[in-house]
Amino acid sequence: MQFHLLTGVFPDIVEHPIVPFKQRFDWDGGFACIAMVLDHQKRQKFIAYFRRICAEGDFGEGPSSLDLCYILKDFNVPHKYLTMTFAGNPEHRFNGCYESLKRDVARLNFKLQHAKQKGIDVKKCSVNNQFLIDHLDMHGTIILLTSELMLFCDLCTPKKRHSESCACQIQPPMYLGCHIVLCGYNGLTQKFMYRNPLHDNHVCNIPYQELDKARKAKGTYEDVILLYNKTPQHKVFRNKDLTTSLAGLRTN
Ligand SMILES: [Zn+2]
């Protein structure tokens, strides 16, 4: 049982229901995360207008976390964006030509300058695991930018990172950005639950310390998008609930 500043104790397990959405290409994982955090009606609209959103957004070689915030704002989804950079520094994300890189930097700088005017709450800060747990418990899901090379799942890739499952990767890049949706935690096993847009068949699990490394790797700028989308459908377990239900199973 963990201590909670507001309520006294944290639930041992929290899981928010997420409708999985698999990315189709190598550049649209961030969009898949958007689809996963929208409610049913907004998701249908997002899918219907996807081509138009891409055409108007001019996302270059892929959407940044700030681009995702602009889309969330357009869909009226309450959120906050935390990052460790206030400059358009996408050099770690892109492998494209110099002209394309220049356009992306200019676009991101423009969007940063106009974020406040647009009504997007951007804050420069670094957060720890306890902060993420608190948000999951109190408010809803979280979109995180991670380094795919550091991302780990001990369910689908035991003792192996996701990127290591790709045999064709002869020389791994220094950084490969991967947006994921953090959807819960298990305080008993000290693991976070997340949805990786690369997989649509299960909720992935990662130890707290491993996620910390993946989301603080060079190139991620510790981008965190906090969503305020908690629904009554989210599951909460406390240790005593589990003990009671296990006892019930044994006697039945
Ligand atoms: Zn997995």
Image (cartoon, rainbow, N blue to C red):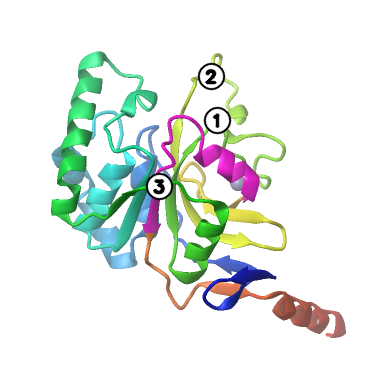
Name the residue: 37% across, 28% down: 93
Q: Where is residue 190 shown, x and y percent of the image?
A: 68, 56
Q: Is residue 223 left or right of residue 121?
A: right
Q: What element carries label 3?
A: loop
- Report helix, strand or loop for mark 1: loop
What residue sits 37% from the left and 66% below the top?
228
Quarter occupied by the C terminus: bottom right
Seen in the image, is 171 located left or right of residue 230?
right
Foreground: disc 3 or disc 2: 3
- Marks 3 and 1 sit apart, C-alpha to C-alpha, by 23 Å
- Tell me whether circle 2 and circle 1 mark residues in contact (CB < 8 Å): yes
Determine if the C-beta at disc 1 is less than 8 A from ligand 1. no
- Give the class, few, some or many, for how many residues have Cα within 10 Å of label 3's Cα (few <14, many ≥20): some
What residue type is disc 3 on?
Cys
The residue pinned by badge 3 equals 125
- Label at residue 172: 2
**Residue 209 falls inside the magenta stretch:** yes
State how far apart marks 3 and 2 are (Cα): 29 Å
Task: Depth check: give the residue in front, 186 or 6.
Answer: 6
| Residue shown at the point (17%, 41%) measured from the top left | 113
- Kindly indicate the quadrant of the structure image that contains residue 249: bottom right
